[in-house]
Amino acid sequence: MTKSLEDYLEAIHRHAQEAGGARVVDIAHALGVKMPSVNNAVKELAKLGYVEYERYHRLKTTPEGERRAQTIYRRHKLLKDFLLAAGVSEVHAETDACAMEHILSAETLERLKDLMKRMTPAQPAPSDEFPV
């Protein structure tokens, strides 16, 4: 799956979690893109089996799409939490985590997770269920 499609899937997941559902217009607004771009991405995600798409209905992830979206989101959250702990501003931590989540290896992410556990031993470990 491309970085772009991962971004769309993550946005659908996040919006559905926050608002109880996601519409094409919601995703377009969240990602700062036009609705035809979202429609194209959603159609591609549907072909891959990650979302159920019906025109004029809310977007719904399939079980496989939900699993994949949760993995992407946990990667993003781990990286953002790490950057914030390192003193990076909220705005830059969000932007940088979004870029990094697509390129770092599973090994690197596991080591970052281990490092975060050592940095904050009194708090719950970030993304313990973190499948990479």
Image (cartoon, rainbow, N blue to C red):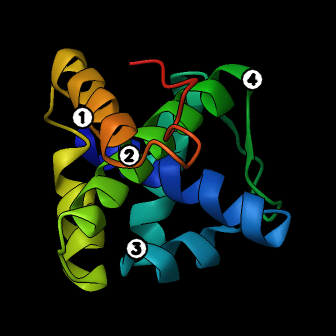
Real-space CA distance between mark 4 and mark 1, rounded to the nearest whole angstrom: 28 Å
In this rendering, would 130 be left or right of 12? left
> Which residue is found at the position 75% from the left and 57% from the top?
55
Question: Can you identify the residue that label 3 sits on?
Answer: 31
> Which residue is found at the position 43% from the left and 52% from the top?
77
Question: Which percent across, then down, holds residue 101?
Answer: 26, 43
Question: Can you identify the residue that label 4 sits on?
Answer: 63
Q: Which amino acid does label 1 sit on?
A: Leu
Question: Which percent across, then down, holds residue 36?
Answer: 44, 68
In this rendering, would 38 be left or right of 79? right
Task: Identify the mark nearer the N-term, 4 or 2.
Answer: 4
Mark 4 element type: helix
Real-space CA distance between mark 3 and mark 2, rounded to the nearest whole angstrom: 20 Å
In this view, the residue in front, 85 or 48, is 85
Instruction: Single out the mark in the foreground, 4 or 1.
Output: 1
Q: Which amino acid does label 2 sit on?
A: Leu
Q: What residue type is labelled 4?
A: Pro
Question: Can you identify the residue that label 1 sits on?
Answer: 112
Mark 2 element type: helix
